[in-house]
Structures are given as C-alpha cells and as structure tokens.
Image (spheres, rainbow, N blue to C red):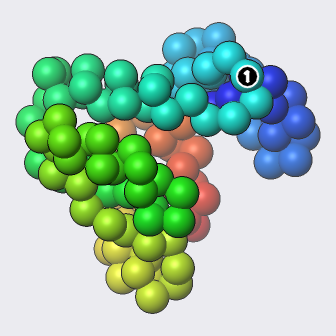
Amino acid sequence: MPADNIRERERRDKVPYSEWVRKGLIEATPGNVVDYRKVKEKLRWARECFELKDGGFDPWNSRQVSVELIDEGFNCVEVSQGYRAISEPTKKLLELVTSTNCRHANHEVLRWSADCLL
C-alpha cells in the first residue's frame, strides 16, 4: 500500500491500515502509487519460503509486471476482476469461511477480509 495514501484510505474505507502497517501485517511503500518493484520482491521472497504454484494478476493494470515475472519463471494466471470471473471463486470462499474450513490463525487482515464476505 502506498504510504502517502494510508490516512486518506483509512477515512474512506474505515479500515485501520496504519495500525496494520505498525504491526507488520501489511507493508507500506514510499510514495503515492503502488511500487511494483516491491511487489515483485515480496513474490520472490514468497517463492523461496513457500510452494507457490500460480500467481493471479489483473490484466487491466498488471500486464507488464506479469510479463517480467513470467521471464523469471513464475506461472502467472490472468484473473479479470469482473463479475463473470470472480463470482464462482467468491462463492467458494464464502462457503469455506461460513463452514469454518478457512483457517487464518486469527490474522487481523485475513479475519477482516473474511468478514467482508459475510
């Protein structure tokens, strides 16, 4: 999340982004736009730590980043953010959350995200 926009986004979204940054639950990057270099660094880190299979990207604004990641050996899968593309996965996630089969170790950001489905 761009650091320069956190306060504005907190007021608009009514979400404690600053607190989450302070706790290390999300990361803020300098400036007022997404720093895709930092996003790619985090993805490289995650690939070393976890068994990443695929990475979803929105073709609307992330095509260049996905091309660069593919060149580095990432398997990037296009995921449009329209209703047609996200309806079924959202229903499945809602099913997992409401059936208590979605475990997130009570992580504040993931809990908030799950609560947004309800």
Image point (26%, 20%), residue name = 45
Residue 99: x and y, percent?
33, 65
Is 117 drawn above or below residue 92 in the view shown? above
Which residue is at 44% across, 72% downward? 80
The foreground one among 99 and 2 is: 2
Q: Is residue 16 left or right of residue 114?
A: right
Amino acid identity at mark 1: Gly
Work out whether residue 111 can be spotted: yes
Residue at disc 1, secondary structure: loop
| Point 81% across, 40% down: residue | 9
Callout 1 crowding tier (Cα within 10 Å): few <14, some 14–19, many ≥20: few
Quadrant (top left, top right, bottom left, bottom right) of the C terminus: bottom right
Q: Locate the N terminus and report the quarter of the image it occupies.
A: top right
In the picture of the structure, the residue carrying the numbered disc 1 is: 31
14 is higher (above) or lower (below) than 84: above
Q: Nearer the viewer, residue 39 or 89?
A: 39
